[in-house]
Structure formats: structure tokens, C-alpha cells
Amino acid sequence: MTEEKAEELVKDPIWFGTMMVKANDVDGMVAGAITATADVFRPAFQVIKTAPGVSVVSSAFMMVVPNCEYGANGVILFADCAINPNPDARQLAEIAIASSRTWKALMDEEPYIAMLSFSTRGSAQHEMVDKVVEATRLLKEKAPELKVDGELQADAALVPKVAKTKAPDSTVAGKANILIFPDLNAGNIGYKLVQRLAKAEAVGPISQGLAKPINDLSRGCSVDDIVNVAAITALQATSADL
């Protein structure tokens, strides 16, 4: 980095806003309504970096599904839906821990974390399943206080009747309110399907793991989406849990 290059970079509003956050001129930043996610987070990764003790930045959506009995009266947290294309088992475990903190800060409900897969409790054998199994093991090791189970299919995670058949001894199956997707394909497709087909409100993406709050918007966002993410950013700036 040279002084000349730095001067050129900060002419970009995203870089300028990120530098304002770094310099404590502002408490947080919301961007992305007309900017790609990568262009929002690239300066955040380079300038703000991760919070102490955190090695991976992730994102979450609070999905508010109308007339839905699953999750916390239709509120379910989806992660990661915007940042990590193919997290490994350790990163998945960290994403789950960060998501539990987001949930605790925003909801007056205990987190129940489902590590999602196309398999439930060994019903299928594949290296992609093995990753989720290992992530679940690491998560239980790193945060034994959390209620977590995996690998679980989405119906086993959410539907009590299905859970009784597929994972009858689980303390999470059938009542999960946090869904950790195995990769970005599943997470991004999943939240957009629920948003459009179930007419759910997708609040986010909420960034997790940065040293200071910077949040990205979908380029398909509405005015309400911008207001919601700005409110969450304000909460992040004042909460020790986010």
C-alpha cells in the first residue's frame, strides 16, 4: 500500500465509510444496496479485521416467517448465507457459536442449533456429511453449554413429528431456532427460497465476527430491510454479545 493508492481507495464511499468506522468517527456502517457483498467486506477484512479470539467472519439472517409454528414463533436464524463459500468443520463450529451470540443478543429465547445436512444421524454417507459431523463434535467441545445437534436434515431440525422418527433422543431436533448451513450454496439458496415462497421477512445479512459493526445489504433490499439492518448495527455497536 502506498500513500497515493490509499488516497485513491478512500475516494470510494465503501472504503471511506470503513475508515470512518476504524477511526471511531462513526460506530458502524451499513452498505450494499447497490454494491456487491465482496466489495463491502473486502475493506472490512483489511481494515477492521476480526474481533479478538475470532478467526472467521460470517453472516446471519433473521428469518421472520408469517403464520409459522417453527423456530421461535416463526423466527429462525440462518447462517452463513453471504460470506463463506465452503467453510471447513472448524469454521462451521465458529459460525455456530457466533450465531448463538447473535440470537441471544436479539431474541429473548434460548438458542437451539441444528447443523444441517442432507443426512440425519448417519442416514447417508459422504464426505460432505463427515464435515458436518466433525463440526458438531468441535462445537460441543468448544461450547459444551450450547444446545446443538447434527447432522440433521432440515425437516428433522424443525418439525417435531419428523424429529421423533429421525432423531428421537435429540434435545434439538424438532425445535431448532438456529440453522447452520453446510456451505454458501445451501445457505444463500435456502434463505431466498424462504423469503420469496413463504413471504418471510429476511432481516440481514447480519455480520458476525468483525471487530466493529459493518453490515451488508442485499441488492434486492427494500426500505424496511435497510431500516432493520441499521437498527441491528446500532445494537451491535452497544452490545458486548455481538
Image: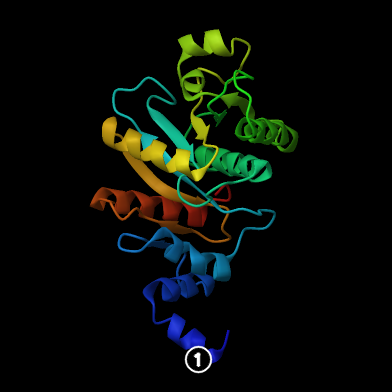
Q: Where is the N terminus found, in terms of image quarters?
A: bottom right
Q: Position of residue 239 (x, y in %)?
A: 53, 51
> Which quadrant would residue 31 be assigned to in this image?
bottom left
Decide if residue 121 is in sight here: yes
Q: Is residue 222 left or right of residue 208?
A: left
Q: Residue furthest bottom?
A: 4
**Relative depth, front residue between 30 and 184:** 184
Q: Is residue 131 left or right of residue 189?
A: right
The residue positioned 42% from the left and 43% from the top of the image is 188
Look at mark 1 in the image and give the residue it sits on. 4
Q: Residue furthest left?
A: 223
Mark 1 surroundings within 10 Å by alpha-carbon count, few (fewer than 14), some (14 through 19), many (20 or more): few
Q: Position of residue 65 (x, y in %)?
A: 33, 30
On screen, 34 above or below 157? Answer: below
Q: Position of residue 214 (x, y in %)?
A: 47, 60
On screen, 27 above or below 218? Answer: below
The residue positioned 51% from the left and 22% from the top of the image is 157
Q: Position of residue 242 (x, y in %)?
A: 54, 49
The residue positioned 51% from the left and 71% from the top of the image is 24
**Relative depth, front residue between 124 and 65:** 124
Disc 1 secondary structure class = helix
Identify residue type, mark 1. Glu
The residue positioned 45% from the left and 16% from the top of the image is 159
